[in-house]
Image (spheres, grey):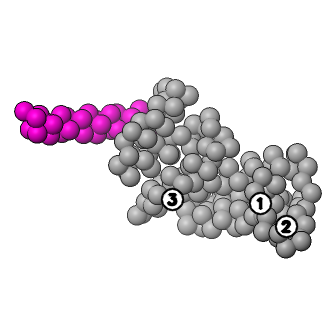
Amino acid sequence: MELRLQQAQRFKEEGNRCYKEGRFRDAVSRYHWALLQVKGLDPSVPCPLQELGGERPHVTLEQERALHSTQSDCYNNLAACLLHMEPVNYERVKDYSLKVLERQPENTKALYRAGVAFYHLRDYDKARRYLLEAIGKQPKDANVKRYLQLTESQLSSYHQKEKQLYMGMFG
């Protein structure tokens, strides 16, 4: 157990180095390797081996915290990498950000990335929700402000079109 956590940490750190060097594909690979190291160790996730009589390794509270921290960091970093890679896969950015928010609902970076993903997926109501939460935690962040303004503009435009549609129907 401890060995796999250490190996996951090493892969995560390699991913961080690759990210800082702008080697996003290599970083994605390292973060995936880190996640593979800890796959099946999370005591909060049912293990198929238990159904076959297999044993899951015993996990201390400290190890469980380290495991969850590593997983959240890797998912958050994967979302960051994907936002730098063309074409951006906003569906995966959304999925990774939401995985982080399941365990860390206050994570500002994950809130922002989820907002960006929902914006590009044209779910402006959800984008607004996540961006408002992010701006509440980082009120001076220019990127969050910019995406919130873009989202508000899209929502306003949508509501105007909706209003005109209904006026034409019931005019």
- The residue that label 1 is drawn on is 46
Is residue 77 visible from the viewing direction of this image? no
Q: Residue 60: x and y, percent? A: 91, 49
Q: Amino acid at mark 1?
A: Pro
CA neighbours of label 2 inside 10 A, class few (<14), some (14 to 19), many (20+): few
Q: How far apart are labels 3 and 2 at the CA level?
A: 30 Å
Provide the major secondary structure of the magenta segment: helix
Relative height, residue 158 to residue 86 (above, below)? above
Whether label 1 touches label 2, CB < 8 Å: yes
Name the residue tied to disc 3. 92
Camera sees residue 150: yes
Residue at the image position 8 percent from the left and 38 percent from the top? 168
**Foreground mark, 3 or 2?**
2
The answer to whether residue 122 is magenta is no
Identify the image quadrant of residue 41. bottom right
Whichever of labels 3 and 2 marks the residue nearer the N terminus, that label is 2
Residue at x-position 38% and y-position 46% = 123
Residue 105 falls in image quadrant: top right
Of 21 and 109, the residue lying toward us? 109
Amino acid type at image mark 3: Arg
Give the percent coordinates (x, y) of residue 85: 46, 61
Residue 114 position, x and y percent, is: 50, 45
80 w.r.t. 166: above or below: below
Q: Are marks 3 and 2 in contact (CB under 8 Å)?
A: no
Helix, strand, or loop for circle 3?
helix
Quadrant for the C terminus in the image: top left
Residue 107: x and y in percent read 61, 38
Q: Which residues are magenta?
A: 143-171
Please tell me which residue lies in front, 129 or 34.
129
Vertical order, 69 against 166 (above or below)? below
